[in-house]
Amino acid sequence: MAIPVEEYLAHLLTDVGVLGVEEVAVTRAGGRVLAQDLVARLAVPPFDNSAMDGFALRAGDAIEGMVPVVGDVPAGGRLPVPLAAGTAVRIMTGAPVPAGADCVVPVEDTDQPSGPAPLPAAIRVRSAPRPGQHVRRAGDDVAVGDVVIAGGTRLGAAALASAISIGYGRLPCHRRPRVVVVATGSELTAPGAPLGPGMIPDSNSTLIASLAEESHCEVVGVHTVPDDVGELARVLARAAAEADLIVSSGGVSAGAFDVVKELTAAAGFTFAQVAMQPGKPQGHGFVAGPDGRRTPMVTLPGNPVSVFVSFHIFVRPVLAAMEGELATPAYLRARALRGWASPAGRRQVIPVRLTPPESPEDPVPGATPTHRLGSGSHLVASLHRANALAIIPEDTTRVAAGDLVAVTLVGRF
Ligand code: AMP
Ligand code: MG
C-alpha cells in the first residue's frame, strides 16, 4: 500500500533539526534564512525629507508675492537650520526638510528653471501648496522598534535592502546545510566521456548538486559509485563525517543490484512506496559517522525526472526545515494547454512549461508538459524546459486541454 505524499514528507522531516546560527555580513546574506525577527534600529525614512526637487517653505508663505530663498539644504553631514517664517530653502529629493518648513514646492511649480542653476534670490510659487505636500515623514515606512522582517524569512534582494535601511550590517542567519551527493549505478559514465555498451551519462549527480545549490546549500561532496556495497559503504562513511544531509540517487527499487537499499536497509533505513508519480520508491535514514554522529540521508530513485520531482517535493522542504525557513511553496493555477494521462491513486507531479495567459479574459498562465509523451521519469533531456511542476490529484486520471491545474514554480528562489 503506497503512502500519501504528505505522510512520507512528515516522516522525512522528523529526521532533521534546525542548524545553528551564525552572523553574516548583510552584503553576503542573499539566499540565507534569517534566524530571528529583525527589529528596526532606524526609522525609514530616518528623517523628514523631500520627495521632489524644489523649495521647502511654510505653505501659508507661498500664497502671494515673492518668497526669499535663504540657501540650499546641504546634502548629508549636518541638518539644515530651522527655517525662518516667510523664507524658503532650495531642496533636492531625499534631503532633510528643515524644521519650520511644512511643504515642498516642486521647481516646476515656481518661476524657476529646473536643472543646474544658481541659487535664486527669491521665487514666485504658481499655485497654493498644501501643507505636507511632497514631504516624506520620518517613520512613514517603519518606526524604530517595529518588527520588519520575520525570523524564518529567506532573504531576497528586497529583504537585504530592507535590513540595511533599518540599520543592520550583519544578520543572524542559520547555517547553510552541507550536502553530499551520491549517484549510484555501475552503468554511470562521467559527463562527456565516451559511452561503453549499456552505459549512460551520469546526469543525476550534477542535477542533485545543482538543485542543492539553487536551494542555497553548500555542496561539499559529489560522488558517483558503482553498484558495489563495499564501495558505497566507504563513500557513505566519509560523507557522514562532512555532511548535514546525504542525498543519493538510484538503487532503491526492487532490482537485484539495488545496493543502496541493500546496504541502508541493514542500517535501519525506512523504504516506502509513495503515492506519487514519478518518484514512487523512496527511502530515508541515518548513516553513522565518526564521533557517534548520525547523518540523515534521503535516498531518491534513479530516473532523472523522478530525482527532479522528488527533490522539489521532499528534499527541498527538508533543506528548508534545516535552515529554519518558514515559507511553504506557493501554488498557482494554470490552464492546461494540452491533455495528458495521470495514474489513478497517485499524485502526479509533472514538469510543465508555463507561458503567459493567452487572453485577458483568462488571466492565468498556460501549462504544457515539457515532453509530448506527458509524464515519463526518463525524459531528462526535455526537463530543462520546466519552469513549474503541475500537481495532479490522486483521483484524477486524465487532464483535458482547458482544465485548471495547480502548479508550483521551480528554479532559484
Ligand atoms: P535505478 O533505480 O538505480 O535502477 O535507476 C533507474 C534508472 O535511472 C537507470 O536505469 C538509469 O537509466 C537511470 N539513472 C540512474 N542513475 C542515473 C544517473 N546518475 N544519471 C542518469 N540516469 C540515471
Ligand atoms: Mg541503479
Image (cartoon, rainbow, N blue to C red):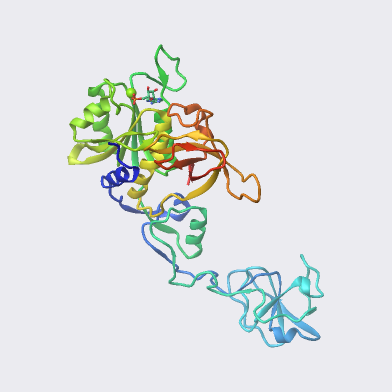
Relative placement, left or right, of 313 versus 352 is left
Residue 197 position by quadrant: top left
The residue positioned 63% from the left and 84% from the top of the image is 100
Q: Is residue 288 above or below residue 47?
A: above
What residue is at 26 percent from the left and 47 percent from the top? 14
Q: Give the x, y percent position of residue 137.
A: 58, 75
Q: Residue furthest top?
A: 197
Q: Position of residue 177 (x, y in %)?
A: 34, 44
Q: Is residue 144 above or below residue 255?
A: below
Ligand 1 falls in quadrant? top left
Most foreground residue, 412 or 198: 198
Of residues 290 and 128, the one nearer the viewer is 128
Rendered location of residue 140, percent (x, y): 55, 72
Splitting the image into 4 quarters, where does residue 343 fall? top left
Image coords of residue 402 (percent x, y) = 57, 42
Picture layout, residue 382 above or below residue 285: above
The residue at the point 78 percent across, 71 percent down is 108
Taking the image as drawn, is residue 177 in sight? Answer: no
Q: Can see residue 390? A: yes
Name the side, left or right, on which 7 lies relative to 106. left
Is residue 71 shown above or below 313?
below
In which quadrant is the N terminus drawn? top left
